[in-house]
Image (cartoon, grey):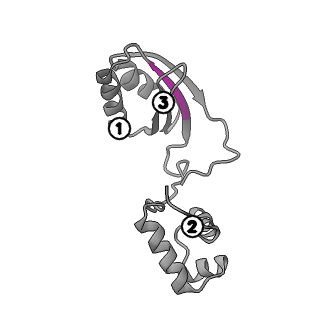
Amino acid sequence: MTKIDEIDRKILRHLSRDGRQSNLDLAAQVGLSPSATSRRVQDLERRGVIAGYRARLNRDVMGQGFVAYLTVGLALHTKEAQEGFERAMRAAPEVRECHNVTGAFEYIMRVETADLAAYKAFHTDRLGTLPHVNSITSYIVMGSPKDERA
């Protein structure tokens, strides 16, 4: 685990809100000189604390505004079954997140499609045809009062 002080936390907080801000603006917000801020950001990148930067996309504008969370249970709990399922989910563009979890099911996923019809096609034609899928429960997102994903 890497050591992160309060100034690093401020830098990370501001960058997580706006990763495109200039170093000059970031320096003013955290109370350091631009050169000291730049050195700290580079150090956080070098140590892997900052793993990368990405654009936050507006899925509604892109025609991908239908969001569902799914839980998936597998019939077999073998390494082969898990690897096959995970390979299929990596190849599915509708799947934005897929997590192997503990509990009553093996996976929780976030799926984004254009609409309910497109989701049904994914559910039936892709997910429903996979071997070892034993159960699928869908939770349709009706609103997101807080979403801090990058």
Q: Residue at x 53, y 52 (%)?
A: 61
Give percent across and percent down for residue 110.
Answer: 51, 36
Q: Earlier in the sequence, mark 1 or mark 2?
A: 2
Q: Residue at x 47, y 24 (%)?
A: 106
| Residue type beneath disc 1 | Arg
Q: Earlier in the sequence, mark 1 or mark 3?
A: 1
Structural crowding at the residue carrying mark 1, measured as other residues with C-alpha within 10 Å and reported as few (<14), some (14–19) or many (≥20): few
Structural crowding at the residue carrying mark 2, measured as other residues with C-alpha within 10 Å and reported as few (<14), some (14–19) or many (≥20): some
Reading the image, the residue beneath label 3 is 119
Q: Secondary structure at mark 1?
A: helix
- Position above or below: 56 against 34: above
The magenta span reads: 68-73
Q: Residue at x 62, y 71 (%)?
A: 7
| Residue type beneath disc 2 | Leu
Q: Which mark is residue 90?
A: 1
Reading the image, the residue beneath label 2 is 15
Residues at marks 3 and 2 touching, judged by CB atoms closer than 8 Å = no
Q: Nearer the viewer, mark 1 or mark 2?
A: 2
Rounded to the nearest whole Å, what is the CA distance between mark 3 and mark 2? Answer: 34 Å
Q: Nearer the viewer, mark 3 or mark 2?
A: 2
